[in-house]
Image (spheres, helix red, strand yellow):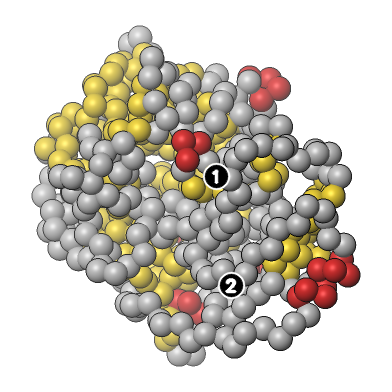
Amino acid sequence: YLRQENEWTELASSAVVEPGRWHHVAVAVDRGDARLYVGGTLDAHKQTAPSLPVTGAPVVIGAAAGPNGKLLQQFRGALDEVKLFDRALDAAEVKAMADVTPPASHALPAPPVVSWNVISGPETVGLWSLPDTVDLQPVEGVRVSSIKAFEPDVDGFHWLHGVGLMWHRGKLYASFGHNKGAENSLGEMARFRVSDDGGETWGAVKTIAASEGNHSVSHGVFCSAGGTLYAFQGAFYDRFQRTHCMGYRLNEQTDEWEPLGKVVDRGFWPMQQPEKMADGNWIMAGLRSKNGYGSEGLEGGGLNLPAVAISHGDDLTQWDLVVVPLLDGLIAPWGESAVMVDGSSITLISRWAGNAPYALVAESPDCGRTWTELHPSTMPMAPSKPCAGMLSTGQRYLISNSSGNNGSARVPLTIAYSRPGKTALTGIRVIRHGPDPAALKPVNRFSYPCAIEHDGMLYVGYSDAEGRRGNANAAVLAVFPVSALQ
């Protein structure tokens, strides 16, 4: 990651890193030509601005320095030696430096793995043996259309993320977070569009809630209940401090969103539309962020943990926050989560942190009031918000970026699913491949999916970066028949 002229330039490697083995990595920037070498071989290059800024800022190795001293893109591994040069090394020099006898490989302790997901074939094996990306078969009958294009030259918005979907009174609603500035900064707003034809065309972009003072509102989820459409949106103060969930109710006479205030506090950000449970309460899965809260007295301490909000019956203005406990010693997650509701039994899926490409799982036997400890599963899943649920056929599903070799790349967009009435995910299909299924470089990035079923069809909304940096996304919709998940 190279910061120039207030913009980030990213060089992405296609090399497959082998855990426990040492790798030589070099970067050279020469008058606007940025080159990335792995093992002495040129792996990526890109034109940048012609000069590097001369500043008094410290050099950060193994991360990118974000605003307010926050470290981003943190590396999880070991660094043996770092060399800095005041000139750009040429290819021969890099090759000579890499052509040394590497230290011996290290035996890595296996993380605690619970065999939660399995796939059936000639033998029943862990889902970590998924086919590689290029070998995954597509879902039949997918229709792709645009919800909101990325068009800053037209509307001035440089950031879009977090699609939410809901059918209400025969219309399809889609929401997203929008910002003319940077992600998680003042000026962020919750916006939406409505479609009368199942997402093929959309009405004007309108606003659910905008920033006021040091308070910003961002992406969230819908809920249609009792003939009323609700919106629950993530919100924060200043620059992503004291995150919380704001509630809104659509007045269909005035077509205005009426604020319900702060409905869930203490760091909760909604990530999945509320689902009705066997006890009559609704459950809304999300992330409990520590930002701006300090660990003292905070459920689960100073970690970004998965959490659920549980309603007081059909009163969707009152919610209880329940934070999912973490397995002792587990690398802290970035707890964006989703749930599968099966009567009073709830299964929660959470993303890991950093580049850890596996799903985390916890289970509740009592409608989300108590949980097993969050632990790793055998399901490969790029670190991104998951989407999970139950179909009308009795099938469980997980929409994510999962294959045998994609690692942390947010391609392809996949759906894993069970047989009707079963808990194991025994099939997987591709909703969307990148331009080249054999390439792991994320030319396209399909992330933060959401889904809603309607009239035998599954509607999947997601962010599509189309090769752009920093969640400069378009909002996209994919629709296909549930019957395709055989």
Residue tagged 1: 65
Q: CA–CA distance between discs 2 and 1?
A: 21 Å
Residue 93 percent coordinates (x, y): 85, 68
- Residue under the point 30% across and 23% down: 248
Relative to 170, is 484 above or below?
Answer: below
- Residue under the point 84% across and 39% down: 50
Determine if residue 260 is in view. Answer: yes
Secondary structure beneath dot 1 equals strand
- Residue under the point 42% across and 18% down: 210
Left or right: 8 in relation to 293: right
Q: Which mark is residue 155?
A: none
Relative to 169, is 354 above or below?
Answer: below
Residue tagged 2: 80
Instruction: Quadrant for residue 259, please give it.
Output: top left
Residue 213 percent coordinates (x, y): 38, 14
Residue 333 percent coordinates (x, y): 37, 58
Foreground residue among 422 and 159: 159
Q: Amino acid at mark 2?
A: Asp
Q: Amino acid at mark 1?
A: Ala
